[in-house]
Image (spheres, coloured by chain):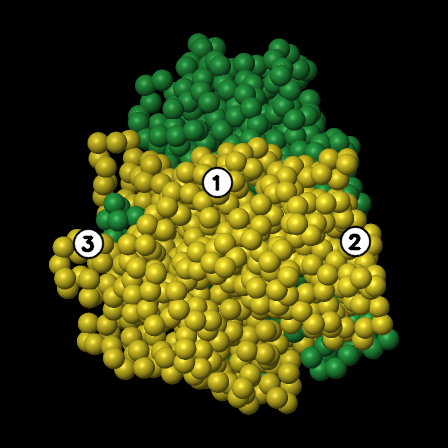
Chain colours: A green, B yellow
Amino acid sequence: MPQYRAPVDDTLFLLNDVLGLQGRSNLAGFADATPDVVEAVLREGGKLADEILAPVNQAGDREGCTRHPDGRVTTPTGFKAAYDAYAGGGWMGLSVPEAFGGQGLPQVINTAIQDFASGANLALSMYPGLTQGAVAALLVHGSEEQKARYLPKMVEGAWTGTMNLTEPHCGTDLGLLRTKAAPQGDGSYAITGTKIFISAGEHDLSENIVHLVLARIEGAPAGTKGISLFLVPKVLVNEDGSLGARNDVSCGSIEHKMGIHGNSTCVMNYDGATGWLVGEANRGLNAMFVMMNEARLAVGVQGLGQSEAAYQSAVAYAKDRLQGRALTGAKAPERAADPIIVHPDIRRTLMQIRAFNEAARALVLWTALQGDVLHRAEDAKERQTADDLMGLMTPVVKGVLTDRGFANAVEAQQVFGGHGYVEEWGMSQFVRDARIAMIYEGANGIQAMDLIGRKLPKDGGRAMMAFLGEVQAFLKESGEDEAAFAKPLQAALGDLQQATMWLMQNAMGNPDNAGAGATDYMHLLGLVALGYMWCRIARAALARKAEGGDTARWESKLVTGRFFMERSLPETALRLARIRAGAGTTMALAAEAF
Amino acid sequence: MPQYRAPVDDTLFLLNDVLGLQGRSNLAGFADATPDVVEAVLREGGKLADEILAPVNQAGDREGCTRHPDGRVTTPTGFKAAYDAYAGGGWMGLSVPEAFGGQGLPQVINTAIQDFASGANLALSMYPGLTQGAVAALLVHGSEEQKARYLPKMVEGAWTGTMNLTEPHCGTDLGLLRTKAAPQGDGSYAITGTKIFISAGEHDLSENIVHLVLARIEGAPAGTKGISLFLVPKVLVNEDGSLGARNDVSCGSIEHKMGIHGNSTCVMNYDGATGWLVGEANRGLNAMFVMMNEARLAVGVQGLGQSEAAYQSAVAYAKDRLQGRALTGAKAPERAADPIIVHPDIRRTLMQIRAFNEAARALVLWTALQGDVLHRAEDAKERQTADDLMGLMTPVVKGVLTDRGFANAVEAQQVFGGHGYVEEWGMSQFVRDARIAMIYEGANGIQAMDLIGRKLPKDGGRAMMAFLGEVQAFLKESGEDEAAFAKPLQAALGDLQQATMWLMQNAMGNPDNAGAGATDYMHLLGLVALGYMWCRIARAALARKAEGGDTARWESKLVTGRFFMERSLPETALRLARIRAGAGTTMALAAEAF
């Protein structure tokens, strides 16, 4: 059975040394995040992940969720207790304003905890994760009354949240949405329709579930401009905040899925359920986007989490399993065979995952920090740049970290040989669970289109210019001892610039040229961003190494980073070549030729 | 529910136009394989796959195999009837000599049928597939008496076969093998030990199961040089060929696996079971290699089969699912949205899989044809070259086709969005089933080591020189109209030559330099081989196109090939860069640093 250990020390190094959290005390709330507070929070969060969430992960996969004939859904044995520990520890409100029962800490700290939680138990982490998304949407778009009535209960975890977008005939294309909202004359609406793929739509972890539901008010325009967001509680809430009658919303069935069996994925039937408008009428997508952006980052973190968990198991197995001898002569001559970690192909696998994980962790924290700056900085220009960078990097974190996270889980599974295919060892679960992250919150192809069609051209390419400017400024300051990092990044940056230029020149005339290169461009930018993170990590590691002490730790980091620069980063050239191929052969065939 | 259609027409084109089967009538048995015989066999095999094997694939995954308390194992509902149709149709003996009840047709025809069968139902196809492997081993290494007693029953499918290598502590490293064989004085041996991961080890499809078991004769040398191969029937066979007493071999348990649920993966307990030596004592690995090479090619074909099946489902979904509008304007303005096949990122996905599948199918048939030449050509030099080429390409077919086959199944699943993650749609099964092919018959890292450490340096690199010579000779004859194919292949070939040179110069001094680049080298050679296949397909398609008639079919093929040359083949440069990075950072860390 896999053993998960949250990467607390590495996260502390990233926050303190690489991202300079302590230099950000100009940001509201950051002054409270002193080094010892941050460390205490992360250590406690690590314990929660290691000791409470991880131990019920494998059993949760085996047992799965059960829908009963009366529509109730029960989660796997042990999930309720683990959820209660999560909620009871105040983790749900880590970065929610104190006014609503939260602790007001930076979002970047919350992101670190999400990394630990999703690595320990992806299925379970989704219940609080979706609640945090719903809280974020209500914080921005909810009325004062809605906030007062719902947020404190959600922040304490007594109530959970969901987001209801998808319908049987409409996923990506929300303009096709059919769920109806009819005004009831008292300010409320009667919501009618069917939603599918609703994660945590029904379960036994909380007293109430607050559904955020996209629906069309009668007479609203067709397409995406006629969609509104509604708050539809499972149980109606009385004036005094107590629970009242059951609302007309129910779970019709749950899906039998490839993975995340511990999370209930529901078909939700709204049969004239009472709901209240959140934000402005017909501006529902706008309100939902707050939740979606939050969720997209969180899903990217899930990709990293599964990659980390799978890596840890693969390392343990590679050290333990004896098979064959090292090519350069026996390393454990006293034993029947060497541990397989001596074999270069096993090493390559482990190094590849590790080199990704460390940079990916830096990237999600860097991106979350942009979110903090955006919400907490005083300077408008600083906020704008942070907003640009976060917008630019959100699809990359979602798309690249989940694509690579899944691929890494597969690679880690491979280390186990036949045992990797047997459910008992837990590697199959990492792969099956990681697979969903490439799909939900917008399939990765949609992330690529969001990047190339929206984020890149927006405001005349301001976001990409800000990113390139930041990287170039960093490279300008790099010393001789950073050459093994700076030079490859410079080359990769060149590929990114050429790809961007090519798109500018070729996508206007034929938008298919952008579409055909979108996924490659997303991965190209992702590689550059990860390479940039390695350059930052290297600078910090060199500084720590120069201080003396336990230099082996910093030396390992530098080796791992050089591996990334030598072996992973050169993929930018391949991505560029594909982008430059354009849409020609991709789009040439008639649909009937398939 | 997925609908599989065996690619009969495409296979006929490959056999007749690309590989020139009809020009091979100098090979024994090929004269019988006239165009109409080949077509009739493939059409009938396609029908078997489409109408008999495919319909029970999904139900087989859901139901799985059951081990009963008495040790019996039952396969899913419908498997027995489908197996009987397979065996009853004479498919098991398609290329087995007529003397043993087979039809003596070329192995390349049998390979085409394996492609259809594994695409239609991987789990089910393994029962006959393993039997064919056991038949191949007995044909080469069995005594005349063993052949006479066992082969006819196996060829008619009344008895099936298995291969028993793995033990709990030994998979790749067979030198650690512990199963014992004690002479019983009557020419037989008492076999005692535990074998794991035995596919089709116990089931209800056949009257008897012929286990081929690796074991160590008492007093034999340690390591791989003391391993012998034994034939251990589940039910002992009387002198007259009738079934006698039950042997002391039983299934202790079956594995709960990620996929291929319809195939029983057994722990087999040998408790003094009676067995007979196959081939020479202590030369068991040698005998087993016949079976393993056969099996490795067949597993490569499985990777292709799952890629094809997943592709077909993704195409059907992409034509059917309406979502969004084409970037270049609505393509189906009369409907609520366009079918998603209009979107460039969906197209890219489909083209990528399709471009791989067509070349991969050519490559497995080309490799199987080398096997036919090796066994049937009169000229010794011709046989030697075929042997070299087949040996060189076997790890590539196994490793690359299963790595890419799995990746393609994942890509095809992605086309379905959330529906791809729900078991009902069948895409998850393709992914879960395809995953095993990267692992069994030697994990792909082992294939890469076999290629780089054994096949490449063997006989002074004769095999690689033969391959390069064949490709260069082909390129020399390429005309102006083939430039879009020949030029990219020339570049890729250059990368392959540079990588080979680098290894020659750097692996002698430090074998880890070979090990660290092994997987990249395997994929590099695989890309070149697939590129070469596309060049051959293109030449044949251009010839057919010049004949006039239905030119759309040939034009589609040429577009698909150009897509491969533009988008997939350039990966050779990345593989070369990684190989050149050497073992430095890969091997630098101490095991404790992980």
Q: Chain of mark 1?
A: B
Q: Residue, x 53% and y 41% (percent of image)?
A: B83
Please, is residue A489 above or below residue B425 in the view?
below
Q: Which residue is mark 3?
A: B552
Horizontal side of residue A404 vs A180, given as left or right:
right
Residue, disc 1: B85
> Marks 2 and 3, Cα distance to the nearest angstrom?
61 Å
**x and y percentages locating residue B273 in the rendered image:** 79, 53
* Residue A327, image quadrant: bottom right
Residue A224 versus residue B28: which sits nearer the camera? B28
Q: Which residue type carries mark 2?
A: Ala
- Marking on residue B273: 2
Front disc: 2 or 3: 2
Which of the 4 image quadrants contains residue A407?
bottom right
**Residue A159, placed above or below residue A122:** above
Sooner in the amino-acid sequence: mark 2 or mark 3: 2
Q: Position of residue B475 (x, y in %)?
A: 30, 79
Is label 2 on the same chain as label 1? yes
Residue, x 23% and y 49% (percent of image)? A590
Q: CA distance from mark 1 to mark 3?
A: 37 Å
Who is closer to the viewer here, B416 or B132?
Answer: B132
Q: Residues within 10 Å of mark 2 (few under 14, many from 20)?
A: many
Of mark 2 and mark 1, the one earlier in the sequence is: 1
